[in-house]
Amino acid sequence: MKISKLLYVFLGYCFIILLLIVNANAIDREEGGYVGCEGQGHDVVVYNFLKHFSYEQYYWGNRHQWTYNNNNRVDAMDFAIFAGHGNMWLIALLDGYVDLATAGSSSHKGYGDIDCEFVAFESCKVVPSPLDATDWYSNWTSEPDDVFDGLHQALGFRTDSYQSTDQSVTDYFGSRIRDNYGVWESWFDAINARAASDEMGSAVMHPTCDGDTYGNFVSDPSETSTSLRVWYQY
Amino acid sequence: MKDSKYIKSFILVLLMGIAIISCAQKQIVVKIEYDQSVGPVTLKDKTIQTYSVNFNKNLSKESVLERAKQLTNVSSKPLDFDKLQEMEGGLMVLRSEKDPSASFEIDTKSGNFLYNSGLSEYKKNNNTPDLILGEKALSIALQHLEKLGLLPSKQEMNLAHIGGLDMAVLKDDNTTEVYKKLATVRYNRILDDVPVMGDSRIVLQMGEMGNLVGLIHYWGEITDRRKVETGELIANKEIKAEAEKRIKLAANGAKRIIVEKANFVLYDDGKGQIEPAYYIQARFYYEVKNKDEKEYRKYDIPYDFYVPILKKPLAFYPHMETANKPSMEVSGSEITPKDDE
């Protein structure tokens, strides 16, 4: 009797240990979504990405999230997504706009010095390619106010992107990120599968991070690194 | 006594009037302009039909594997055929352990699929050898479709795009090197001379010597086409009114609004319905300034949507989708960041 009791206690103990090991190995990452404007469906665009995760943040967009408070917002997330109006290195928010070329100028620096690996901009033209700007790189990496401070990849469009397709793109993209396909490759798969024929994606990244998935990515690049590559459709 | 009552009423009405006028002045109404290329919104002389797509194919595992093997034979890139995953919603998926960008994902209800043979071998700093681009890529794309038994009726094929995928790298001397990686050819669909927007498409990606690298085939089998009766349609003026209503609702803060497209199209909702609609594309012009700045930054964005023309549409349009609402920011809220690099 005593032996069987001990056996049950031992088995129970093993079960708890097993649970702890499984949980320790599970991917527990943070996702945040920021909505640039009201009344044009951008909330649906952001939500359609977030709904594939047990996300941490889902906010109407304000400048501080991308600038002087990014350690508590964008850079506190592993994956941050924005939907709203955009232009080259610019995103529009409810209280103004953020120039991504200088968004890392505060004490919170850019993105990646705390946690963020990936940002996606479901917006027009935020990530230019060499076809759009000869100097497509320095606005991402010029110290001391740049945003690539350990960030792995920034995904976006080099052309316009449309409201009629955005929410479907982020939905499909979210499912592929959740399922651990390559990050930038998933962005292009989603654009090919759901966007219009004149929407062209682009993805700028540190070269060592080119093979990242959301479940398995390389160590953060140095905050001062200026190495970059950009994949783009034309 | 009576006079003072009248005076009070008069003052009240006057104050209300001033309040209404000041509110109206704050809400600047921007006139909607139409580009010269935009024709009248009218359903007159249009072929108006709805189409049903076969979403009851219920493809077996065997036929899914057969299709996947056919694709991998053409691309010469294997997938893990012994690990077919059955996902929710009738999706079946094959992947590759070697390359996280490789996959074959098929909707067993419709047969629509996405195939990506994997991009890991394209990430070196070099041009893809013997890459065939431009018009020449077109004939190779058609050959692939024919070989795979996926070439649709030519009447339904509308060449939408010939392009590609490049990778550019920043070199040590701050110059850019561009590497040509893939060729892309995309077909959109036309049904009875009306362009189909929404899900329908065939997108091919090709690498070395035109080898197939990716194929998206969303080209549902039409099982029924039905002529729409006049009584089922909304009036022309209602289409325009609905379009302008939605533009005004969305254009908050825009300095200028120009409607650039108002096209009669079919909309494929990717759920079994292809339906007639008006596709509207407007451009909003904005000027933005942060509180601490003097100069405005100018930018413009497209705003596009569909106006269903059926009184009782069956298709599910993008504007019908809803989502949980985001939270408003709580001032000073902070979290403890965690780095799980």
Image (cartoon, coloured by chain):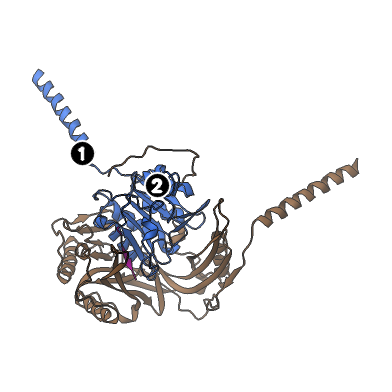
Chain colours: A blue, B brown
Mark 2 belongs to chain: A
Q: Is residue A82 left or right of residue A208?
A: right
Q: Main secondary structure of the magenta part?
A: strand
Secondary element at image label 1: helix
Q: Which residues are magenta?
A: A227-234
Quarter of the image holding residue B210? bottom left
Whether residue B228 is visible: no
A141 in magenta: no
Q: Residue at x 29, y 69 (%)?
A: B178
Is residue B332 or residue B43 the one in the foreground? B332
The label number, if any, that marks residue A173 in the structure image = none
**Chain identifier of the residue bearing label 1 in the image:** A
Q: Residues within 10 Å of mark 1 (few under 14, many from 20)?
A: few
Residue B172 vertical position relative to residue A225 in the rendered view, above or below: below
Looking at the picture, do discs 2 and 1 lie on one chain? yes
**Dot 2 corresponds to which residue?**
A109
A4 and B225: which one is in front? A4
Image quarter where the N terminus of chain A lies is top left
Measure how far apart labels 2 and 1 are at the Cα level: 35 Å
Q: Is residue A127 visible?
A: yes
At a point 30% along the width and 66% down the height, the residue shown is: B168
